Amino acid sequence: MTDTTTNPAAPVPGAADTGAATGQTSGRPDTWASADRGQLIERAEVIVTSPNRNFVTLKITTADGVTGLGDATLNGRELGVAAYLSEHVVPLLIGRDASRIEDAWQFLYRSSYWRRGPVTMAAIASVDMALWDIKAKVAGMPLYQLLGGASRTGLMAYGHASGKELPELFDSIREHQEEGYRSIRVQTGVPGLESIYGIASNKTTEGNEGVRYDFEPAQRGAFPAMEDWDTRAYLRHVPTVFEAVRNEFGPELPLLHDGHHRMTPLQAAKLGKSLEPYDLFWLEDCTPAENQEALKLVRQHTTTPLAIGEVFNTIWDFKDIIRDQLIDYVRGAVTHMGGISPLRKTMDYAAMYQVKSGFHGPTDISPVGLAAQMHLGMAIHNFGIQEYMQHGPQTNQVFQQTFTFTDGYLHPGDEPGLGVSLDVDEAGKYPYEQAYLPFNRLADGTVHDW
Ligand code: GCO
Ligand code: MG
C-alpha cells in the first residue's frame, strides 16, 4: 500500500511524468497519447477517506488542469480496490489521453487479462467516471447532456423505511414521506430474531453505539458483526407487515422490499406470491445472484416484479436474465458495473426487453457514484427508479454536491461535469477505519447468506 491511498494530498509516484507507459521497461509503448497535449493525464490520485463511512475516490487531473472524480468504493473491501488502483491502474494512466473514454475502458478491461470481479470492475469504474466528468467539464455541460440530454424532469427516488415493530415502521414511513419521498422500501424485524438486515438493531458493537443500523450496515471494527436468520419465520411475518402497511397508507404508495439474497427459489416464489395482494413496486434480490436459473422458478409462480443485480459487475451477469425476461429492474451500480459506459450499454440492451433501471444507491455508493447514476438516469429512456439513502453530514462536507431532491425527485444539477467536488483538506481529517458488513448464522450455527 502506498501513501497515496491514505494521504489525499500526496502525489502519486510518477505522476509528474508524462508520455506513454510510464516506467515501461519492455515491449512497444502504447500509442494512446496522440492527442492534444492539454488533455493528457498528468496526475491520478487515490483518495481514501472515512467521513461517515469509508470511500475510495480516484481523482484524475489533465495537463490543462481539468479534474475528474470517480467512485471506487467496495463496501468492506475498500483497501483492495485502493491497492489495485495505486499499484496497477494509476501507473498506466499517466500520459494517456483523457478524452478517449471507451478506449481507456477497453484497454483496462482487456489488457489485464483477468476479467471481471468486484475489485477490478470498481477500479475500472472509477476511471470511466472520472473521464466522463472531465469530458463534460471540457464540453461545459452537465454530463446528462453529453449522454443524450434529459429524458425526464427528475428521477423518482425511494428511501429506506424500517422498524423492528409496526409502530416504529409506520413512523419511519411517515418521516420519509415528510422528507418528500414518494416511494418507500419497507424492511421490518421478525419475531424471535434479534438483529436482521435492513432494520435498526438494538444491539450495538463497541465504537458504534447509537449508530442506526438501517442507515449504515457496515460497522467499524476488526470483525463482521454476527446476525441471526430464520427464513420460515420471515416468510410467515412479512406478508402481515405489508398488509398492515397497505391498510395504514392506502393502495397508491409504491412499496419495495429487499429479500437480500436469503431465500431458496421455492421460498422466494412463495414470498412473491404471498405479497401479490399488496402490489409491490419490486421484490429485490429474492435469491442469491449466483444461481440465475433460480429466477425461472420464481417467475413461474409470481407476478410480483423482480429487481436484481447490486452485486453484479458486468453486462454478462445481466445478459441471460434480461433476455429470458426473468427480471424487471436492473439493480447495477455505476461503481460496481465498471462505470457509466458499460451500465449505459446494459440499459440499452435491457430496453429491448422493457426492463428498467433501479440503480443501487445505498450509502456505500459515494456522492460521486450517486451523481454518475443520476446523470445516466436522466438520459436513458428506460429509467425506473433511483435508490436514495442519503449520506451523512460529514460525507457531505467532504464531497460538495450540486444535486437537488425535491418532492421525491432527484436532479443532478446543471454544473459542467458530474457536479461533485472533493475537499481534500476535509477528506484528510478522516483516515480509513476498518469496517465490515455483517454476516448471518442460523439457530444451529450454520453460516447463511446475509
Ligand atoms: C440495498 C442494498 C444495501 C447493501 C449494501 C452492501 O438494497 O441498498 O442491499 O443495503 O446491503 O449496499 O454494501
Ligand atoms: Mg439490496
Image (tube, rainbow, N blue to C red):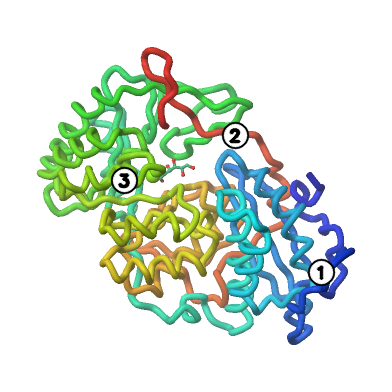
Give the camera-side residue of 301 and 2.
301
Which structural element holds mark 3? loop
Dot 1 corresponds to which residue? 21
Residue at image point 24% right, 37% down: 268
| Residue 134, placed above or below residue 220 | below
Residue positioned 76% across, 64% down in the render: 92
Give the residue drawn at x 73%, y 80%: 39
Is residue 182 visible in the rendered image? The answer is no
Pointer 2 with pointer 3, Cβ within 8 A: no
- Residue count near mark 2 (Cα–Cα under 10 Å), binned few <14, some 14–19, many ≥20: many
Gap in angstroms between the C-alphas marked 1 and 3:
44 Å
Residue type indicated by callout 3: Glu
Measure how far apart labels 2 and 3 are at the Cα level: 33 Å
In the rendered structure, the answer to whether residue 241 lies left or right of residue 16 reads: left
Instruction: Determine which residue is flagged by label 2.
Output: 435
Q: Earlier in the sequence, mark 2 or mark 3?
A: 3
Tell me the distance, in whole angstroms, between the alpha carbons under discs 2 and 1: 35 Å
Mark 2, secondary structure of its residue: strand
Q: Residue furthest top?
A: 444
- Tell me which image quadrant ligand 2 sits in: top left
Q: Amino acid at mark 1?
A: Ala
Question: What amino acid type should be assigned to the residue bearing mark 2?
Answer: Ala
| x, y percent for residue 196 | 37, 28
Q: Are marks 1 and 3 in contact (CB under 8 Å)?
A: no
First-in-chain label (2 vs 1): 1
Residue at image mark 3? 293
Q: Quadrant of the C terminus?
A: top left
- What is the secondary structure assignment of the residue under circle 1? loop
The number of callouts visible is: 3
